[in-house]
Each structure stands twice: as C-alpha cells, then as structure tokens.
Image (spheres, grey):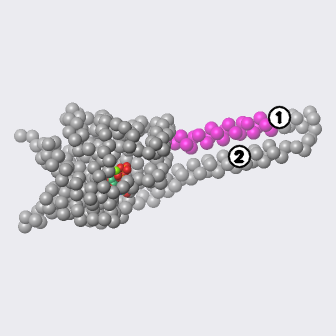
Amino acid sequence: MELPPSITCILPAYNEAENLQEMIPLLCEYLPRLSGRFEVLVVDDGSRDATSAVAIQLAEQYPVSLIRLSRNFGKEAAMSAGLDHADSDLVILMDSDMQHPVDVLEIFYQHWLEGYDMIYGIRADRSDEHPIKRRMTGFFYHMLSQSADVEIQADAGDFRMMDAKVVRALRALPERKRMMKGLFAWVGFRSIGVPFQVAPRFSGQTSFGIRRLSSLALTGITAFSSTPLRIWMFIGAGISCLAIAYAVIVVLRTMIWGVDVPGWPTLVAGIGFLGGVQLLSVGVLGEYVARIFSEVKARPVYLISDYHPASARKKTEHK
Ligand code: UDP
Ligand code: MG
C-alpha cells in the first residue's frame, strides 16, 4: 500500500503565543483530513512573549517541532528557516495569526493531487485594509509588474502549499535579502492560485507597519528588476541632449546679437535641476550597491538558537 504524503506546515511566529494556542490544535485536527503523516513546524522569530513555551507545551500533545531563531530576523528569514528544515513531500506555509483559513488547504491539496507543484492563496478582496495601504500596494504591484523580469502575482501572499521539488529549488537560492513572494515566482513550476477570504487577526496586532512594508517593497523592486538603473540612463541622455541643444542656441544667439547679461535664472534653474537629478540617480545606484554589499557579506539569513524536532521529543518521552 502506498503511504500518504508527508506534510510539514510551517508557521512563522513573532509574538504569537495566544494565536498559536488556537492555531496549532485547529491545524492538528484539520491536517489528518489530508494525510495522517503531518507535522507542524513553528519558527519562533525572536518573540518576546511565550511563543516558544506554548509550542513546546503543545508538542506534548501534537506533532509540533520548534525552531527558535536567535533574534527577530523578519518573516522572510523565518520562512526560509522553516523551508530549510522541512523534509516532507508537501510543505504548507501559513501565518500563525489565524488570518489564513485552514479550510482552503483541502482545495490546495486537491490541486496538488492534480499535479500542481505550487498552490498559492490569492486575497479575494482587500476591503479590510486601509485605503491608503491598498493604494500603495496596488502601486507597488503595478511598478513591479512593469519592471520585473518575472511575473509576480498581485494579491498572492505567503499562504502556499508546495511540492518538495519547489522547496529544494528555493533552498538552492543563495540570496540574503529575500522577498519570498518574488522567489516563489522566480522558481516557476506548475502553479495555480486559489482565492480565499482573509480573516481578521485572532489576537495581537500586525508587525508589518509602513516601514517594514516599504522596505520589503524596495527589496522586491531592486531584487527583481534593474529598470530603476536604466531609467536614469534615459533621463540623463534626454537632459544631455536638451543641454546640447540649448548650448547651440546660446552660441548662435551670441554670434548674431552679441553678448547680453541676462541669463542668471536659467543658469540657476539648470544647475539646480541637474544637481537634483544627479543626487537622485546616485541614490538609486546606492540602493543597488547596498544590496550588493549585503549579498557580498554573505551573512546567514538567520541563526538558530534551539531546535526541537517533534520526533525526538516523542522518543525521549517514551524512554
Ligand atoms: N512574523 C514573523 N516575523 C516578523 C513579523 C511577522 O515571523 O518579524 C510572522 C507573524 O507571526 C505572522 C506572519 O509573519 O505569523 C504575518 O505577520 P503579520 O500578521 O504581522 O502580518 P500581516 O498579516 O499584517 O501581513
Ligand atoms: Mg497577520
């Protein structure tokens, strides 16, 4: 008889003690519908609350593994840590705040059985978000889709189910600054989106404020497109042409009418404008250089302080 596929469900968790208390039992009741061989892998991303303690306590009752990172590395790093330690046939990525509904997993699973390698959730609507955030997200995805080398699905999130071969491909990617959504798109494979309704957070509040989101957006754009570098080449070329044309006009005018003193405003405006353009383009360059710097340093994406695999815990209990 063929064994059912093994499943690892990765839960990145940053200060989610209360949510995990709900989320893990819910998942462990639900996952047997897909396969009896499952494991929940909690990645504690440097939480300051009892997240790890809750996971360890629930591990006595449920098949829960825990990876504890040495500090808060961010969700992208926490997901990478989970993916590096998931050796199952199927890997699920979910938020631990109950915003991703477990019922959708059955649909994901059906698609996997049909032969899809990556199944991702698409936010059916964003009406729960602040209109300004919605606008900015829309703008970001527009920019990205215009410039990126791969097509990054708008509204697709980190709620995903993937085959082991996708996980292997993701692990092989060496970059440090990781925007997982972009990497998911980059690796390709047979993928399909499934719309789902985002639930409100069960407890606590989001850790993705405007600063984190814009930094993620910048990583997304610089990691997946070199258009910002090229734009300045074209703008620079355009301005140079204008400047040459203007110089020709000035020379001709001087030859025909002689020298006249006025011209200060144009001069100052020209210098100011060019100064601004140069600073801006240096800034764009700097952004890419900073990315290169952080890649060259080649520091690990995350550091693990403790690892409690589910099976080992079970074994010690039986001794
Ligand atoms: N998260 C994490 N590290 C962080 C921030 C968030 O592992 O530094 C986890 C968090 O515990 C949750 C998921 O990432 O499981 C999504 O975070 P959040 O709910 O704050 O973001 P939102 O749902 O608003 O996008
Ligand atoms: Mg959330």
Q: Residue at point 59% right, 51% down?
A: 283
Which residue is identified by label 2? 274
In the image, is residue 225 part of the stretch drawn in magenta? yes
Query: Where residue 3 sits in the image (x, y, percent)?
Result: 10, 43
Residue hosting label 1: 249
Residue at position x 26%, y 35% from top?
116
Question: Residue 147: x and y, percent?
Answer: 50, 38
Q: Amino acid at mark 1?
A: Ile
- The image shows residue 258 at horizontal and vertical percentages of 93, 38
Q: Which residues are magenta?
A: 223-249
SS majority, magenta? helix
**Could you say where residue 42 lies in the image, as x and y percent from the top left?**
25, 56
Q: Is residue 96 left or right of residue 312?
A: right
- Mark 1 crowd level (few <14, some 14–19, many ≥20, 10 Å Cα): few
Q: Please give left or right for residue 311 compared with residue 97 in the image.
A: left
* Label whose residue precedes the other's in the sequence (1 or 2): 1
Is residue 229 highlighted in magenta?
yes
Q: CA distance from mark 1 to mark 2?
A: 19 Å
Report the label total: 2
Q: Residue at x 47, y 54 (%)?
A: 211
Quarter of the image for residue 157 reads: top left
Q: Nearer the viewer, residue 191 or 133?
A: 133
- Local crowd size for mark 2, using a 10 Å CA cut-off: few (<14), some (14–19), many (≥20): some
